[in-house]
Image: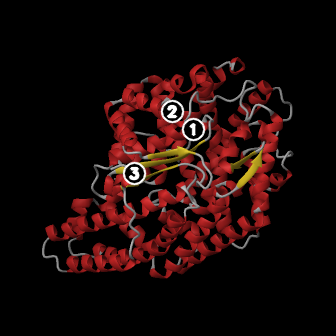
Amino acid sequence: MKFEEMKKHVPSEKVYKKKYEELRKELSEATSKEDAIKVVKKYHKLKDNLTSDSTIISIRHTIDTTNKEYDKANNKCDEVLPVVASYEALFIKDLVSSKYRKDLEDKFTPYYFELLEAFLKSFDDRLVPFMVEDAKLSNEYEKIFATGVVEFEGESLSLTQLAKYLSDNDRSVREEAAKLYYGYIEEHDKEIGEIYDKLVHLRDKMAKTLGFERFTELAYLNLSRLDYTPSDVIKYREQIHEVVVPEVTKLRKRQAKRLGIKKPDFLDYSLKFKSGNPKPIGNSEYLVEKAKEMYNDMSKESGEFFNFMVINHLMDLDAKKGKRGGGYMTYIPKYKSPFIFANSNGTAQDVDTLTHEVGHAFQGYLGSKISVPAFRMPTLEACEIDSMSMEFFAYPYMESFFGEEADKYRYTHLDEAISFLPYGVEVDEFQHWVYDNVDATHEERCAKWAELEKKYRPHLNFDCIPYLNKGKFWMKQSHIFVAPFYYIDYTLAQVLALQFKCEMDKNREKAWKKYIKLLKMGGKYPFVTLIKNAKLRNPFEEGNVKKVIKPQMKILLSIDDTKF
């Protein structure tokens, strides 16, 4: 079904309450394991229907946050979903204590029940008002950025549309765009700071209501991090600090040299080459057409998948006023349809986002064959392996997107893949500090960010935007606000995607088969077990970061970057 044909159904609390009561009754009256299995399958269908309805509304709301019909429907979902979760929790309690549990574990695996028990540990009826408020505050934050409009060179531009000028060849243009972009954030500094403070205290209360010492423990459960801990993450961050930060410093010195700038400001680093950054040679329609050719050439499965996406209008790619920033892939179970949301603005990031989100969507498409909703997609850090690896698998086709600038793009992309890692762990360390120090003031949080900036990105200075020198850069990172602790995932996945890059450099066909195997496993295992089963090295183990960074740095440094 085409996306525009999918009807809007706002979930009803009353309807779902009744359906969950019926499920509980059926489970209690089950007289055989077959009866119990049928009840669980009905539960999966019910869950799929709720997810589908709320996802369709969410997509349409993010495409146009100014649409009153979908703003109202989205707000209603924010109110209803936590309440429905409380009815679901009652059913899950019955399920995990069912006399048929062993039979159900044989059918759905013990890990399925580990996920259910993690949900019960992280949810309670008392959290419902907090969850509603959390969603409301998150929407307030996102609306500040989605509705932001600035006047630039005689045009009214959204912040996403303005962003492409932050990497313009002309430094005066970059500086003017940066002053407008960050000036808008500065105008809303107090408001953004207050929203975050409310979110932090709200989440801390949620955790303490459930008996946790701090929100971090609850967040890890919410993210189904069942086979690694914050201490594993600390050791991993240390690897990034020791191995990657010095390499990124080398790359930035190299960049400054080729740009001919002795003391670069942060906005200078957004320009990679004097000749300008690589730019795609067509608009989003052109990119989709070339992507269609690419995925049909890659494999039969990837071709069938991308044709399905195009035929059913399952992508909204162009930046426009009122549209939420960023990009994402989501999944509509009722129609077995992934959906890709992006904000194309004529930069190389359009291709990054398209290949990245297509990686997610390809896994979602392959995972649609899995009947258990919880197993269709892996946990978030594993999901990001799917997307980031696809960016590398697309390398041989870049001439179609960039023409003569294909090599320039590949160099830039690999540079950015490595350079992102310190920033990613900086975001994570910042969040751990925030939830360990919930009563810190807005300015204390900013001071902590500035301290971490010196640790992980020592090459940066913000002299041209004094506001950012006060540690304010983090306020544009939406994940910190709306998806707490979901960021280290990108870095873990990047390390694993770079492992795929190392393998495809040696034997692309073998690496592709390994990649498809990973995608088809979906979320049948927790993260560490999943990557072990996929024969990928564990990034938490000492030395494994270095094993992928060193060979890829060797490739970068062997390229004559002055030729671009």
Tell me whether the residue at label 2 lies in contact with that at label 1, contact meaning CB atoms closer than 8 angstroms: yes
Residue placed at 64% from the left, 64% from the top?
Answer: 141
Name the secondary structure under disc 1: helix
| Residue matched to label 3 | 3
* Rendered image quadrant of residue 257: top right
Of the two numbered discs 2 and 3 in the rendering, the one whose residue sits closer to the viewer? 3
Specify the amino acid type for callout 2: Leu
Specify the amino acid type for callout 1: Asp
Residue 376 visible in rendering: yes
**Mark 2 or mark 1: which comes first in sequence?**
2
Task: Specify whether 386 is left or right of 182.
Answer: left
**Mark 2 or mark 3: which comes first in sequence?**
3
| Residue matched to label 2 | 287
Q: Which class describes the residues within 10 Å of circle 3: few (<14), some (14-19), or many (20+)?
A: some
Q: Is 514 drawn above or below residue 218 in the view shown?
A: above
The image shows residue 106 at horizontal and vertical percentages of 22, 61
